[in-house]
Image: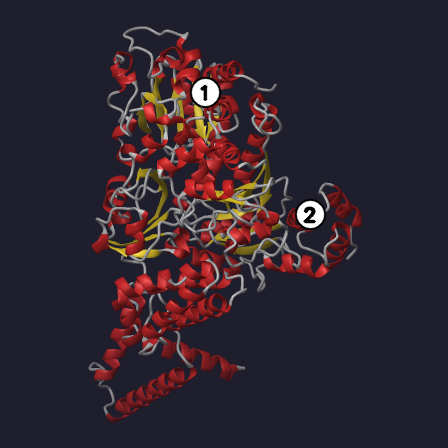
């Protein structure tokens, strides 16, 4: 069934609203990768079986991830006339309890995490009171109502909510008229923390993640119900390509893949490039370890990316697009395939979209496990079926990209921002964030942090707010040591800079980068030299090998770091690393090499004393690194041990029966052994253990 | 070992000829055969019209491809940053040691290939490991072994 007109779109919206806010009990289960890995499939099955068994009439729906991954599996319920309630860490037993309580009409209080009173429809700038379901939907342009539901307002919702930006005065904190609606129906749940009061969500501003954890990602109608594809309709019917680009420029949106190039400028370059054939690419090769926002968006709201890409294609004049998604994300691929098929069936992709005459198709290209393919020129080589090696720029992809044609390539998160920016206007978007970094950024807050998950916050928020207010501090009461941003291309930010506001410029000044948005919290038990080595092992392995500074430089840096970690560092290693890092940074061909030294440079900059402890004292302060010994050292230690043994024997001979008092050297040896076993994992510098090992080895050899 | 040409022909018929399909074809072959047999590389080269050297280059460049057979179940132990700081390295070492896997991570009975992977994108439930397409969170060395035991002897569809 093709959608050809606004009326068709509104019909789809109403179908979506009917499942989003059904007139019967609704149960939702978070079924993104992290939810499934935490056991949501079993929970889902239990809920289905149980509701059937007890004859409960409930609409059960999978949803994406709302971000609070530390609370997975999550189950949400909506009963007619009541707010949405979320249960956390749901076990199959709890699922049985939830189903039973729904059937009996009471509410299970165990495991209740939060309560959502309203769904914000960001695209339209409206808020939906869940307790009143479909009937409670009002648009910002409607006069506020007091009292009961008025159904007919739905139809106008879609039509009136898509406005061009300049006239829209709604700021980032603007709320719809929902606030003026009475809250009487929900007073019985006030003991459950409201969504906006939960520390994890309180400071968030969800633009990219607007639908994640709200809609069923398999339902295009539910996406439309949340204002989806209305922006595309407006773009195709009312705006010129240049107007679209101008709006994106006005928003100040910068590339969310990490480098932060202004998106509108990039689109303009592609549009201005001569040629009839142009391409759009969505970079979903989220290779940074520790970052998973793209996966979550693709799994929870794939249509937002498709709509963004289609708008972008119209703006730059492309008719074919590719989504390059990494093979490690099987669920994201599945959701995308489904979404593309649905959009094609609705005529929102393909020929003559919405009857506008504009055509655009999207193809899926699966990665094959090469980190360097996140670099745009390598990515395009990979789509072309070649080895994923980057090439020098210029020419930039905007001039000569995929198959030698002008190509506009943006990251998943960037694309997901686009529909909202066009719907609400560039000015609206540019009010969020800092002077040079507009809007919000999604971060995956992970590592040694209590509330780990996916967060979307306005640019300019401090690291302290992220780690402590949202993240709830360090796990197991540990002491915060550093936060790592930007993956292998980024750096470590120490505790002294915890009040740093997060934006592109300030992260770069601190030696890190925004990157794709991974934030890994580290405590005192993490060794910074080991972390630098960890990232260099990765970049050395993932360097494609095309240019020498990266291929050899990362290898040698990794080797040097390994030596330092193993207690074989020598004076001058730090300076050598710094010098080599500069060389690799300056001379490498692509972003991989240019940023690979960042982890080394920032750890030296902020944690030089740890390097020195490894090199001079042969100690790992965090007790992580395992010391290795050279053959000469082992020989020396063996000799020493033998000498001690002989001395002991002599002692025994000279004073028979007098064993109570031990010689000084023997005492020391014992003390050392004790210390060694206390820090089992870190025998760094513990020579007596190594000596014993050497002895054992020797004994084995003798046997042979 | 007898090479199943029919299987390969079926895969090739599902893709358009041209270099743009190369990676997708190799992925399917890897899935079906659990490695890329030499015969397949040569045949693919002639069927889609690109030099065998280029096919070989692609086959050896990407991590997803292997020129030697993998085990029936591919176990990916995540060594992403979040998993690393939560002790994933010990899991990989322990599992490989206990399962007597060779340098490529494959067990002697070809039941498992134990690989490392840099980030499965489930960082919030680190450390994570994946068996075939199933992800397991909050693992530790012993739990990991227990998970693998559950797969022993099962075919892909049963697991």
Image: A217 above or below A19: below
**What residue is rendered at 30% in x and 19% in y?**
A176
Q: Which residue does the numbered mark 2 point to in the structure image?
A: B32
Q: Which chain does tag 1 point to?
A: A
**What residue is rendered at 30% in x and 50% in y?**
A505
Q: Looking at the image, which is closer to me, A314 or A203?
A: A314
Identify the image quadrant of the C terminus of chain A. bottom right
Spatial separation of the CA atoms under disc 1 and disc 2: 41 Å
Which of the two marks, 1 or 2, is nearer to us in this view? 1
Residue B108 in the image: state x and y as whole percent.
Answer: 63, 60
Image: A616 above or below A267: below
Image: A445 above or below A508: above
Identify the image quadrant of the N terminus of chain A. top right
Q: Looking at the image, which is closer to me, A89 or A5?
A: A5
Q: Which residue does the numbered mark 1 point to in the structure image?
A: A225
Label 2 crowd bin: few (<14), some (14–19), many (20+), radius 10 Å: few
Left or right of A30: which side holds A187? left
Image: A235 above or below A36: above
């Amino acid at each position: 069934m093709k959608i050809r007109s606004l009326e068709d779109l509104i019909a789809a919206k109403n179908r979506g609203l009917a499942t989003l806010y059904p007139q019967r009990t609704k149960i939702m289960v978070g079924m993104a990768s992290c939810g499934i890995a935490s056991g949501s499939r079993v929970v889902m099955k239990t809920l289905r079986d149980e509701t059937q068994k007890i004859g409960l009439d409930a609409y059960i729906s999978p949803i994406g991830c709302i971000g609070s991954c530390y609370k997975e599996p999550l189950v949400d319920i909506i009963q007619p006339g009541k707010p949405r309630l979320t249960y956390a860490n749901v076990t199959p037993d709890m699922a049985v309890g939830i189903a039973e309580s729904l059937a009996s009409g009471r509410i299970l209080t165990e495991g209740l995490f939060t309560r959502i009173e309203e769904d914000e429809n960001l695209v339209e700038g409206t808020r939906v009171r869940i307790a009143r379901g479909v009937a409670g939907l009002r648009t910002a342009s409607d006069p506020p109502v007091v009292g009961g539901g008025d159904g007919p307002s739905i139809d106008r919702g879609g039509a009136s909510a898509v406005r061009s930006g300049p006239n829209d005065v709604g700021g980032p904190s603007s709320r719809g008229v929902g606030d003026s609606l009475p809250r009487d129906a929900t007073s019985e749940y006030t003991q459950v923390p409201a969504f906006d009061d939960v520390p994890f969500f309180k400071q968030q501003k969800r633009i990219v993640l607007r639908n994640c954890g709200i809609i069923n990602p398999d339902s295009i109608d539910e996406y439309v119900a949340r204002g989806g594809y209305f922006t595309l309709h407006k773009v195709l019917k009312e705006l010129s390509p240049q107007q679209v680009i101008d709006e994106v420029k006005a928003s100040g949106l910068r590339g969310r893949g990490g480098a932060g190039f202004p998106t509108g400028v990039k689109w303009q370059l592609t549009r201005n490039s001569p040629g009839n054939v142009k391409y759009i690419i969505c970079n979903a090769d989220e290779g940074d370890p520790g970052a998973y926002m793209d996966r979550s968006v693709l799994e929870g709201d794939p249509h937002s990316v498709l709509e963004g890409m289609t708008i972008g294609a119209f703006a730059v004049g492309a008719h074919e697009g590719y989504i390059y998604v990494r093979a490690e994300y099987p669920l994201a691929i599945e959701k995308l395939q489904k979404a593309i098929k649905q959009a094609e069936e609705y005529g929102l992709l393909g020929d003559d979209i919405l009857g506008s005459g504009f055509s655009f198709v999207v193809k899926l290209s699966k990665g094959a496990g090469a980190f360097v393919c996140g670099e745009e020129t390598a990515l395009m080589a990979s789509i072309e079926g070649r080895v994923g090696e980057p090439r020098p720029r210029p020419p930039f992809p905007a001039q000569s990209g995929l198959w030698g044609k002008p190509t506009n390539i943006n990251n998943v998160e960037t694309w997901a921002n686009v529909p909202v920016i066009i719907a609400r206007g560039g000015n609206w978007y540019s009010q969020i964030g800092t002077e040079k970094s507009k809007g919000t950024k999604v971060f995956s807050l992970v590592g040694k942090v209590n509330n780990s998950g996916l967060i979307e916050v306005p640019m300019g928020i401090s690291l302290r707010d992220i780690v402590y207010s949202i993240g709830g501090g360090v796990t197991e009461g540990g002491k915060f040591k550093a936060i790592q941003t930007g993956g292998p291309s980024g750096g470590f930010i120490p505790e002294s800079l915890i009040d740093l506001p997060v934006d592109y410029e300030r992260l770069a000044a601190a030696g890190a980068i925004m990157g794709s948005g991974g934030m890994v919290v580290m405590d005192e038990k993490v060794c910074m030299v080991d972390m630098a080595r960890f990232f260099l092992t990765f970049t050395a392995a993932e360097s494609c090998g095309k240019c020498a500074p990266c291929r050899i430089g990362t290898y040698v840096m990794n080797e040097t770091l390994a030596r330092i970690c193993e207690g074989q560092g020598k004076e001058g290693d730090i300076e050598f690393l710094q010098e080599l890092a500069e060389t690799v940074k300056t001379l490498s061909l692509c972003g991989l090499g240019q940023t690979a030294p960042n982890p080394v440079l920032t750890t030296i900059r902020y944690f030089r004393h740890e390097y020195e402890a490894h090199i001079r004292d042969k100690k790992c302060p965090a007790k992580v690194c395992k010391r290795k010994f050279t053959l000469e050292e082992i020989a020396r230690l063996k000799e020493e041990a033998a000498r001690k043994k002989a001395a002991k024997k002599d002692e025994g001979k000279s004073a028979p029966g007098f064993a109570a008092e031990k010689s000084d050297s023997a005492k020391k040896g014992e003390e050392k052994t004790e210390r060694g076993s206390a820090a089992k994992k870190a025998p760094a510098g513990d020579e007596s253990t190594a000596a014993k090992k050497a002895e054992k080895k020797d004994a084995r050899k003798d046997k042979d | 070992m007898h090479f199943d040409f029919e299987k390969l022909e079926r895969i090739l018929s599902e893709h358009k000829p041209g270099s743009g399909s190369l990676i997708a074809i190799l992925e399917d072959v890897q899935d079906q055969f659990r490695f890329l047999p030499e015969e397949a590389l040569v045949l693919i080269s002639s069927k889609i019209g690109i030099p065998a050297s280029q096919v070989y280059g692609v086959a050896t460049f990407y991590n997803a491809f292997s020129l030697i057979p993998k085990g029936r179940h591919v176990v990916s132990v995540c060594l992403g940053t979040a998993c690393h700081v939560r002790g994933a390295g010990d899991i990989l070492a322990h599992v490989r040691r206990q399962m007597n896997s060779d340098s490529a991570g494959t067990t002697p009975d070809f039941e498992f290939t134990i690989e490392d992977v840099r980030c499965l994108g489930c960082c919030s439930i680190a450390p994570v490991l994946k068996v075939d397409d199933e992800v397991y969170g909050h693992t530790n060395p012993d739990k990991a072994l227990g998970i693998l035991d559950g797969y022993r002897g099962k075919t892909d569809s049963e697991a």
